[in-house]
Structure formats: structure tokens, C-alpha cells
Image: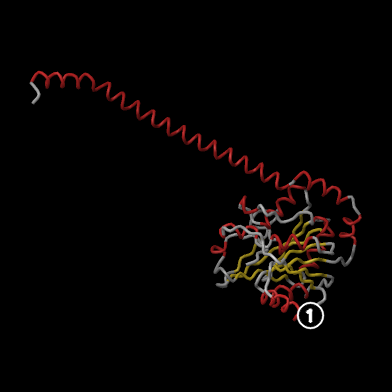
Amino acid sequence: MASPVRTLLRRVANKLAAPYVGELSTRIDQMRAEIRDLTIMRSDVELGELRRMQLMLRHLDDEATENRRRLYELRSSEEYELAFSEPEPLVSFIVPTHTRFEALRDVSLPSILGQTHANVEVLVIGDCSPPETAEAIAAIGDPRVRYYNRTVRGPYPEDKSVRWYMLGSPPFNDALSLLRGRWVAAMGDDDAVRPEFVERVLAAAQEGRYENCYGRLRVNYRGGDVFELGSFPPKKGEFLTQAALYHSGLRYFQMSLADPLFQEPNDWSLCRRMMDAGVRFGMIDAVVCDKHESRYESHSDWGVHGIPQVD
């Protein structure tokens, strides 16, 4: 048991030390707050540095300087002028596909082959597609359709949450080396272009000397909801390749296999890189293509996906 003297001394010490203890506690709280602020600042700096490095890596992948040089060379070539001067130029449609051979046969190909501008060719590139795809194309029996099937699918990321950013990119790139047209159109295997798509967009492109010209796209959802996309100038989520024609001299712009790394849809990545290089864009204010979206009830369920897609 403490003696009365010790108890009294302890009380006196505590009373004398109280102001210093309170001050010390306040100072500790201040130091903790400063450490917390420094930690946040460090995190912000690190995030900013990571973002800067990401932009640098994307810039290297974009090859913007080389793309501008190629564009300037293209504009001085005979090939460039023919796309604008020929009255009925050949238009090449690229259609990547995987397993949706019924939609390809019943939706996409009939809409392309039924164009009022009849001078078209269709390059269907199978992404390691089943035999039914060749059978579906043979059933149509139109010599304007050429089919090439890849023996290996992809490559695509194993992570399905980012795979959609580049679905269809490898077969699309293969088709670029095979096309013969003056103009290029890219289609999904379950999308349908309006009958006057080529006629209207091509006329606007030739008149305005646009190197990439596009219209509006209507998304028809499974639940009956309808949503239109398309604005000028192009912006993410409003530019879709199915509604566009572009000069075939620009086929050196390939779909980038790095798009999933930057979480950028392949159609927008292609458009953005063209804009960065100085490609001339134009737009007509008309719906020229329909996308029949069977996987989602409405636009809020869908979001903005990379197009063309291959399931």
C-alpha cells in the first residue's frame, strides 16, 4: 500500500505534468496528421508518375510520328486521289467472325451485299471458326464474298474483364493485308448496314475529301430499347467503326493488341490514332447501321464496348 506521502507526491507530479502531457498529445496528433498528408501526397505523386509512364508507353505504341509521315506520303500518291475521283470505287468490307455463323448469314452479309452501291467485296475472316461458317457463306453463293479462316484464335488476354477491348482485332488486321478496295468498312458479324450506307457516306467523303467519314449507329437492345450513337467531332463512345468508311491507304493503321493494357476499346483506339496523325474526318447526320444487341436489355446494361466484337 502506498504511503500518504507518496500518494501526495504523485498527485502533485500529475498536476504539474498535465499541461505538458496535453501539449505532447496534441503534438503527436499533429505529427500523425502530417504523416498521413505526406502519405497521401506520396500516393498522388506515385499515381501521377504511373499515369505519365502509361501515357509515354501508349505514345510509343501509337507510333504517332511515323503515322503522320505515312499520311503525308499517302496524300501525295496516285492511290490517294483515285479514292476521291473514281465514280464507283470498290469498297472492301471486313467482317471478323468466330461462332456466330447464323447471324453472319442472315444479318450481316445480306445487308452488305444488298447495298445500292454494288461494287463491294467482303472479307470474312474466321477467328478459328467452325466448319458451319464456311457452309453459311457457301449457301449465300455470292462471288463478292471471300472467306479466310485462321488456324489459331487471338491471341486474347486470359482476363475476360479486359478481353472485350480487343475482340476481333487479330482477324481484322489479317484482312487489312488482303483487301483490294479504295475504301474500307469494318463490320460486326451480327450488325446490319442500311441499304444506302456506302452510297451516302461515300458521296460525303468524296465531296468533302474526308479520309474517314461516318454516320450514326442505332443499337437495338434485346428488351426493345433503342439507342443512337454518333457525334462530331469523334469522341469515345460516339464513334463506331460499323458506321464508317475510310480511305484504304490508311490500312497501315492496325488494331492495336495493346488496347487491353490501356483499357481502350479497339474501335476508339483506331479512331484516336487516326485523329492524332491528322486524318481528315467528316460525318453525315443519318443512321447508316443497326447493331442488334442480344446480350443486354438496355443501354445502361451494355455500356460502351469495342467494336467489331467476336464472341
Badge 1: few (under 14), some or many (20 or more) residues near its Cα, within 10 Å?
few
Total numbered badges shown on the rendered structure: 1
Q: Nearer the viewer, residue 207 or 264?
A: 264
Name which residue lies at 57% across and 72% down: 222
Quadrant in the picture for the N terminus: top left
**Is 62 or 98 nearer to us in this picture?**
98
| Residue located farthest toward the front when viewing the structure as drawn | 151
Q: Quadrant of residue 109?
A: bottom right
Instruction: Report x, y in % for residue 131.
Output: 69, 76
Instruction: Find disc 1 in the rendering and name its residue.
Output: 141
Q: Quadrant of the C terminus?
A: bottom right
Q: Position of residue 267 (x, y in %)?
A: 68, 58
For label 1, the SS is loop
In percent of width and height, residue 26 lies at 33, 27
Residue 298 placement: quadrant = bottom right
Q: Residue at x 67, y 77 (%)?
A: 102
Q: Residue at x 79, y 57 (%)?
A: 251
Q: Amino acid at mark 1?
A: Gly
In this orientation, which residue lies closer to the viewer: 161 or 277? 161
The reply, left or right, for residue 81 in relation to residue 238 is right
